[in-house]
Image (cartoon, helix red, strand yellow):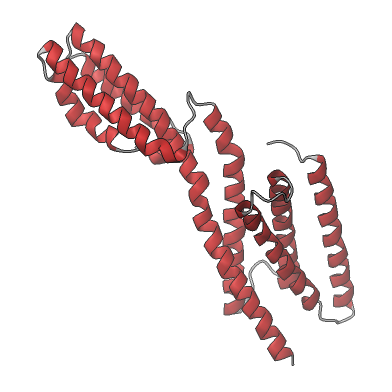
Amino acid sequence: MRPLSRSGAILAIVLAAIFVAVAFEAQRGWLAFEDTSILTGYLMLGLMIGLTLFAGRKRLSMVPMGRASVWLTLHVLVGLLAVAVFWLHSGTLWPSGLYEQVLAALFYVVITTGIFGFLLQKVLPARLTQSDQEIIYEMIPAETANLRAAAQNVVLTCAEETGSDALARHYDEVLHWYFQRPRFFAGHAVGTTRAQHWLHHNAVSAERYLSEKERLYHRQLYDLAAEKCSIDLHYAKQSLMKWWLFAHIPPAAALMVFALWHLILVNVYAL
């Protein structure tokens, strides 16, 4: 992973200084028997509101509001500061009250999914650039359909030219399933070679039953299968980069609602 840029380093220093100042004030107040939860609580709420601005920045990408990379760095650094302030505010890793436990659980889910998504955004694009091709996510169904049609055409041509249905039977029994839609999602997502091994095993198994002329079509068929394997890899990794938001945004929205309700309750009972 690349080190922080100059602007990122400045942001990190500023946020670290803010935390040190808040921690020092909280320690001073605790020694003076003062209630420091107001300071840390309102800071925590402010940080949470700030974290939501990154989502707003993505939706307003056409508006000149600074580089997206700077906003992402700010989002990550503020998230880390929020973790430290949360522990400072609660005074423990896991609170005792039921309502506080719900808040803590939502907070940890949001932080965990945020870290997971950040790692995905940093690692997967580099992995995709190492593949043999580039493809837009929305075009994957059409590309899969084109490969399926081409594979069926190879099988039909082979049957017509050779008078043998051996390759056609192999396609129906093995590859028809494979060409229907993206396959081996889990393997492609985590970076295993299970799909490649599966293709190689079936290619070798079928080739021994084919004539020399049929093997020419057999190689064409498995070239198409290898191309689809690359498309499946893009589908799996690009899906992860898109779908992780469904595990991050709903808990984040719920956390904001619970935090605001917590603020209302604290102020009502403080009266």
The x, y position of residue 49, in whole percent, is 69, 66
Give the residue displayed 46% in from the left and 39% down from the top.
Answer: 137
For residue 107, above or below residue 237: below
246 sits to left or right of 100: left
Work out whether 271 lies above or below 15: below
The quadrant in which the C terminus is found is bottom right
Name the image quarter holding the N terminus: top right
Q: Residue at x 81, y 56 (%)?
A: 15
The image shows residue 38 at horizontal and vertical percentages of 78, 78
Coordinates of residue 246 in the picture (x, y in percent)? 49, 56
Q: Nearer the viewer, residue 238 or 17?
A: 238
Query: What residue is shown at x 84% (from left), y 47% (from top)?
Result: 10
Is residue 184 among the parts visible in the rendering?
A: no
Task: Find residue 187 and report its image quarter.
Answer: top left
| In-image side of 153 versus 258 (left or right) | left
Residue 35 appears left or right of 72: right
Which quarter of the picture shows residue 123? top right
Residue at 14 percent across and 17 percent down: it is 159
Which one is in front, 1 or 64? 64
List x then y, in percent, for residue 133. 48, 26
104 sits left or right of 28 in the view: left
Identify the image quadrant of residue 120: top right
| Vertical position of residue 249 compared to residue 132: above or below | below
